[in-house]
């Protein structure tokens, strides 16, 4: 696009009209206001970033989690650490924004001084031009009046037929009027010459001032554009850094294992691997002799045998050979879907919903694939995957590229890099 120039587009419609110059000055004033608006935006964003960062640091330091153990505690501690890192990064971003605000303020003040310097020069030229213009107009009116007066006097002298004495007076007056007209003409001419010199000076000053103001306006636009661009880059970097911090938490969470935590708890707090022995029935009426001979329950008198068997037999059978291992082996085998549901929330599924959950899980597993090879996305619509990741396939393209989802992110991956679970 061909650049247009201020000096070619902002002239006045008349000799004393300064509408073009005033339009340029108004543009510079609007530019100064825009600088203030950008400063205000960055200041508010600075306060928000600083407040948000400090609140994140406070949250991270006040969070508990000291009662947890093993891998889950490590994951929680890493989360607190990364939240604090995110908060510190936001505080650092607020410091960067403060520096940006100072740069804009310095630039605006420098332009203000530069603008006032040229404005004062133009105001002096304008005043000089207007003053001389008014004087020239007045001298022109005086010149025209003197010329009319001289013409009338000369015409009166030519028409008079009175005595010589009156005629001499009229000729003298006509001569004086002509001299006054000549002097007025000379003054008017000198004013025109001076006004032309002032006009040429004003014209050159106007051109140079417009060039300077156009350069200042270009500098202002460039500076604000760069400032806004840097601001956007800072925000993008903030998002990237936030994601990097959270990715560190995800990597630790991948190592969080239910079995490891339970085994760690058992190793720390174990008390005994066997339950206490059962409490046996001892008959109050049993004599010392019978205890020495150790009779079997079948030798007890009728009626009492049934009492002993009913009281002791179930207890002896269920508790005599019981152990932790025996209890664990006696549990009914769980289905894969039941194990998954129990491990996710730590609760057994409701009996009425177990079949529905099993069907939902089996249908979801049909779209789940495991990643066989690492793949780093080269395009913006591709998904980065690592070996061992589990992804859900949303669409299978005929060209071999499949649309998959992992951890809420969706993108294209090579279909031959995936294996059916």
Image (tube, rainbow, N blue to C red):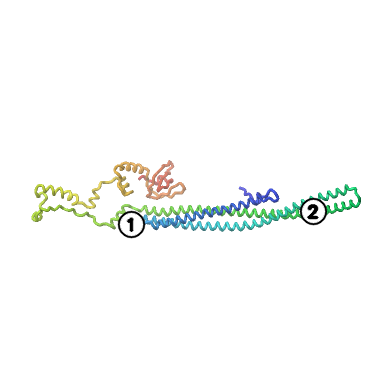
Circle 2 SS class: helix
Q: Image point 12% across, 47% down: which residue?
A: 306
Element type where label 1 sits in the image: loop
Q: In the image, 319: left or right of 221?
A: left
Q: Which mark is residue 374?
A: none
Q: Where in the figure is residue 167, as x and y percent of width and height?
A: 89, 51
Residue found at the very far left of the displayed protein: 289
Which residue is located at x 52 percent, y 58 percent?
A: 99
Which is nearer the eye, 291 or 260? 291
Mark 1 is surrounded, within 10 Å at the Cα level, by few (under 14), some (14 to 19) or many (20 or more) other residues, namely: few
Q: Is residue 84 left or right of residue 187?
A: left
Would you say 257 lies left or right of 42 here? Answer: left
User: Which mark identifies residue 67?
Assistant: 1
Q: Is residue 215 left or right of residue 247?
A: right
Of residues 383 and 355, the one drawn nearer to the viewer in this rendering: 355
Residue at screen point 73% across, 53% down: 134
Quadrant occupied by the C terminus: top left
Along the polypeptide, which appears first: circle 1 or circle 2? 1
- Residue 360 placement: quadrant: top left
Report the label total.
2
Residue on which disc 2 sits: 184
Residue 346 locus on image (x, y percent):
31, 49
Image location (x, y in percent) of residue 197: 73, 55
Instruction: Sort mark 2 into few (<14), some (14-19) or many (20+) by Cα contacts within 10 Å.
Output: many
Front label number (1 vs 2): 2
Between the residue at mark 1 and the residue at mark 2, the CA separation in whole angstroms equals 107 Å
- Residue 283 in percent (x, y) is at 12, 52
Give the residue displayed 21% in from the left and 51% down from the top: 322
């Amino acid at each position: 696009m061909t650049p247009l120039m201020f000096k070619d587009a902002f002239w006045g419609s008349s000799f004393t009209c300064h509408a073009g110059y005033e339009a340029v000055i108004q543009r510079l004033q609007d530019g100064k206001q825009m600088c203030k608006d950008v400063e205000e935006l960055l200041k508010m964003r600075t306060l928000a970033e600083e407040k948000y960062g400090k609140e994140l640091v406070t949250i991270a330091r006040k969070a508990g989690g000291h009662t947890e153990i093993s891998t889950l505690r490590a994951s929680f501690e890493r989360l607190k650490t990364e939240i604090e890192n995110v908060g510190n990064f936001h505080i650092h971003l607020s410091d960067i924004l403060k520096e940006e605000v100072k740069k804009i303020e310095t630039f605006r003040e420098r332009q203000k001084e530069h603008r006032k310097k040229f404005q004062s020069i133009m105001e002096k030229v304008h005043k000089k031009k207007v003053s001389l213009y008014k004087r020239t107009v007045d001298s022109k009116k005086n010149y025209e009046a003197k010329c009319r007066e001289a013409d009338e006097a000369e015409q009166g002298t030519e028409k008079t037929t009175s005595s010589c004495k009156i005629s001499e007076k009229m000729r003298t007056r006509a001569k004086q009027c002509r001299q006054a007209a000549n002097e007025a003409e000379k003054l008017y001419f000198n004013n025109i010459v001076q006004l032309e010199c002032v006009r040429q000076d004003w014209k050159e000053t106007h051109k140079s001032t417009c060039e300077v103001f156009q350069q200042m306006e270009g500098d202002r636009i460039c500076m604000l554009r760069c400032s806004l661009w840097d601001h956007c880059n800072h925000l993008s970097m903030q998002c990237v850094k936030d994601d990097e911090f959270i990715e560190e938490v995800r990597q630790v969470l991948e190592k969080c294992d239910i079995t490891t935590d339970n085994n760690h708890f058992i190793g720390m707090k174990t008390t005994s691997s066997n339950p206490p022995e059962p409490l046996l029935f001892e008959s109050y009426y049993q004599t010392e002799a019978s205890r020495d001979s150790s009779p079997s329950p079948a030798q007890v008198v009728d009626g009492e045998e049934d009492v002993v068997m009913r009281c002791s037999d179930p207890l002896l059978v269920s508790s005599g050979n019981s152990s932790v291992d025996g209890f664990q082996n006696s549990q009914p085998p769980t289905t894969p879907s039941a194990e998954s549901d129990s491990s996710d929330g730590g609760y057994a599924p409701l009996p009425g919903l177990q079949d529905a959950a099993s069907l939902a899980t089996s249908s979801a597993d049909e779209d789940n694939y495991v990643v066989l090879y690492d793949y780093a996305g080269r395009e913006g619509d591709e998904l980065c995957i690592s070996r061992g990741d589990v992804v859900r396939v949303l669409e299978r393209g005929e060209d071999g590229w499949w649309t998959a989802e992992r951890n809420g992110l969706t993108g294209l991956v090579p279909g031959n890099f995936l294996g059916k679970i």
